[in-house]
Amino acid sequence: MPQFILTYHGGSQPSSPEEGKAHMARYMAWMSGLDMVVGQQPLKNTHVLGADQIGTPMMGYSILNAPDIASARAIAEKSPFLEMDNASMQVSELIVMG
């Protein structure tokens, strides 16, 4: 089955610990039942090299199995990450080299 990487960009921080816990609960509920290879992996200490054409740096990623790009996109569109202000997500199919 093809694998897809979801990259998380931007997004606001929760305004309170309670909001953070509620958001995490929604994320865990969304993720349960998906064929995740790698669940959400936050990134830190990100450095952009070269021409700064990236826009909003990647904040984290997930890798999932899905039958096709349309299915992967439909899964991503339901992510609670997109509920945050200034949040965007990129969905890309991984190419197996070799």
Image: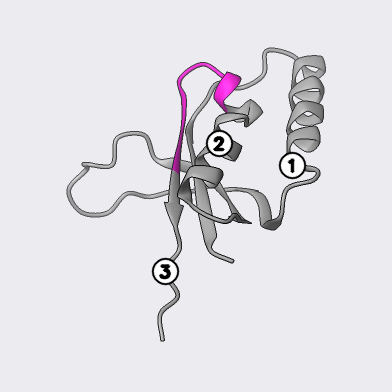
State which region is magenta. Answer: 82-90
Q: Position of residue 91 (x, y in %)?
A: 45, 45
Q: Which mark is residue 74?
A: 2
Furthest residue toward left: 51
Judge from the rendering whether residue 7 lies leftward or rightward of residue 33; answer left or right. left
> Tag 3: residue type?
Ile
> Tag 2: residue type?
Ala
Q: Which mark is residue 16?
A: none
Q: Position of residue 40 (x, y in %)?
A: 65, 47
Q: Which residue corresponds to the image point at 60% horizontal and 39% vertical from the top-left?
A: 75
Label 1 residue SS: helix
Report how far apart the C-alphas of labels 3 and 1 lie in the structure: 23 Å
- In the image, is residue 79 above or below residue 37? above
> Tag 1: residue type?
Met
Label 2 residue SS: helix
Report how far apart the C-alphas of labels 1 and 2 lie in the structure: 13 Å
Q: Which residue corresponds to the image point at 74% horizontal and 14% vertical from the top-left?
A: 16
Numbered label tally:
3
